[in-house]
Structures are given as structure tokens and as C-alpha cells.
Image (cartoon, helix red, strand yellow):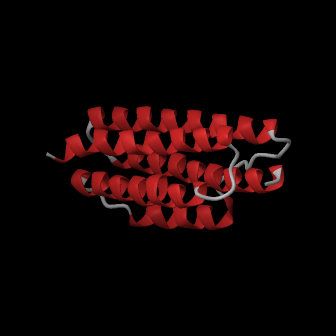
Amino acid sequence: MSNEVIVEELNTLLRGTYMGIRSFEHYIHKVKKEELKQVFQSMQQDVKSNAQKLAQRIQDLGGVPADGEGFSGSMHSFMHNVMLPDDTHEIIEDALKGLDQYGVQYSEELVRGDLDPKSRQLAEEVIDTSRRQIEQLKHYLH
């Protein structure tokens, strides 16, 4: 497998990570409870850290890291912000759905492809972050 293929796979994951950062931004602005706002801020910092690690790995492979979520990602982000409910419970449900669909399921499909062991390990760490965040958020539904 070539570095170009690995870089493209990692860049796809990176663009998704940027979408996650933007989604957390929406939650932070919408949610009223200070404790939950801080939880979302902490989660956003974890995702930003993952984005930095992905960008560094892409550079190490000789590639140029994506610098945003891409056109389709920004359209999705815009629609997400417009349609996001005001209710705290619904905001948490939306976050859980996004983390599961994109942060775990879609990302897992992506990393089944052509990645070298070091890149695969990094991708798994990114996915594990989403898994931890799902478990953390589930506590706020009760």
C-alpha cells in the first residue's frame, strides 16, 4: 500500500474529526446547563487533540493534512446547527447518535482499509475516544 492511499484514508478521518469539533461547538452554544457545557468542552478538546495527532501522522507520511471538514462536511455542519433542538435531552441524544454513527461506525469502516500498523493504531485511538465519549454522555440521560 502506498503512502498516498494511507494519507487519503487518514485525511478522510481527519475531515470527520473536524466535523466532530464543529458539532461540539454547536452543542456548547446550545446547551444551558453549565456542567454539560463543560463536558462538551472537554470532549471537544479531546477531539482537537486527535485532529492534531492525525495531521502530524499525515505529515510524517509526506502528505498534506486537510485543514477543515471539506465542502460536504461544512454543508452538513450548517444543517446540523440549524436543526439542532433546544432541549438538553435531545441535544445529548443528537451527540450520542453522531458519535456512534460517525465517530465509531463510519470510522471503523474507514480503517478497515489500507492503513499501515502505526496509522491503524492512531485511527483506533480516535475511535476509542468516541466510544469513551458515548459512555460518558449516556450518564447524562438519566
Q: Nearer the viewer, residue 61 or 67?
A: 61
Residue toward you, 8 or 114: 114
Is 114 on the left-hand or right-hand side of 108? Answer: right
Name the side, left or right, on which 68 lies relative to 4. left
* Residue drawn at x 74%, y 56% as measured from the top left: 8
**Residue at the spot 27% in from the left edge and 32% down from the top edge:** 35
Residue 59: image x %, image y %?
A: 80, 38
The C terminus lies in quadrant: top left
Residue 113 image offset from top left, x and y in percent: 64, 59
40, above or below 11, in the image: above
Judge from the rendering whether residue 90 lies leftward or rightward of residue 132; answer left or right: left
Residue drawn at the location 40% of the way across and 66% of the way down: 83
How many numbered markers are drawn? 0
x and y, in percent, of residue 96 in the image: 34, 53
Would you identify the image quadrant in which residue 91 lies? bottom left
Q: Is residue 17 shown above or below 76?
A: above
Quadrant hosting residue 84: bottom left
Task: Please provide percent x and percent y for residue 89.
Answer: 22, 53
